[in-house]
Image (spheres, helix red, strand yellow):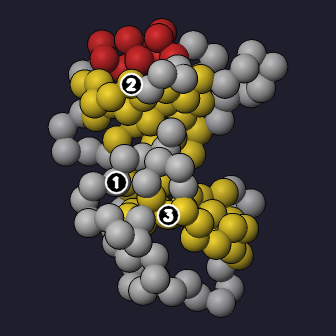
Amino acid sequence: MATEGIEAVFMETHNWGKAAKFFQRLGYELEFATDHNSGQLRNGDGPTLFIAEVPEDREPQMQLVLKVPDADAFRLDADIEVVTPFEDTHFGTRLMTVRDPDGRLWSLQAPAKNQPQGSETGHE
């Protein structure tokens, strides 16, 4: 089984409000906001954009999240480095991290075991 393309972009910011307004001005619509300075936006049928505020002393990061339809059926080639295997998240998905040949980390996200496909909520 292969990944199914980019599911989301996870982006950190020093100011959730400014970041959300910036992307809304670019045509993204707010799907939800959390009570801890984060939220999810979407533009049409494209990948979601999840933005989370981090402290000023931390450099904001950005990461692409690839979609995996079923974590239990997913198999990687032996030459792909798994940094963290699939783990349940507090936001209702299962997440794995792999490292590409240049050292970049990639997130692979699948629905939780008891969650129907298509109901993922993204990073929180």
Kindly state the secondary structure of the residue where label 2 is placed: strand
State the residue at coordinates (34%, 41%). 48
User: Residue 48 has which mark?
Assistant: none
Which image quadrant: the N terminus?
bottom left
Kindly report the distance in space between the C-alpha atoms of the residues bearing marks 1 and 2.
15 Å
Residue at which label 1 appears: 120
Kindly state the secondary structure of the residue where label 1 is placed: loop
Q: Nearer the viewer, residue 14 or 121?
A: 121
State the residue at coordinates (51%, 39%). 124
Q: Amino acid at mark 3?
A: Arg
Q: Amino acid at mark 2?
A: Ala
Q: Is residue 81 visible?
A: yes
Picture coordinates of residue 43, whole percent (x, y):
24, 33
Q: Is residue 30 above or below residue 9?
A: above
Sequence-first tag of 1 and 2: 2
Query: Few, some or many C-alpha atoms within 10 Å of disc 1 (few <14, some 14-19, many ≥20)?
Result: some
Residue at which label 2 appears: 33
Q: Is residue 89 left or right of residue 84?
A: left
Query: Few, some or many C-alpha atoms within 10 Å of disc 3 (few <14, some 14-19, many ≥20)?
Result: many
Q: Nearer the viewer, residue 68 or 87?
A: 87
Sequence-first tag of 2 and 3: 2
State the residue at coordinates (53%, 49%). 90
State the residue at coordinates (44%, 36%). 50
Which residue is outermost to the bottom? Answer: 78
Picture coordinates of residue 85, whole percent (x, y):
64, 72
Residue at which label 3 appears: 94
Q: Amino acid at mark 1?
A: Glu
Kindly report the distance in space between the C-alpha atoms of the residues bearing marks 2 and 3.
21 Å
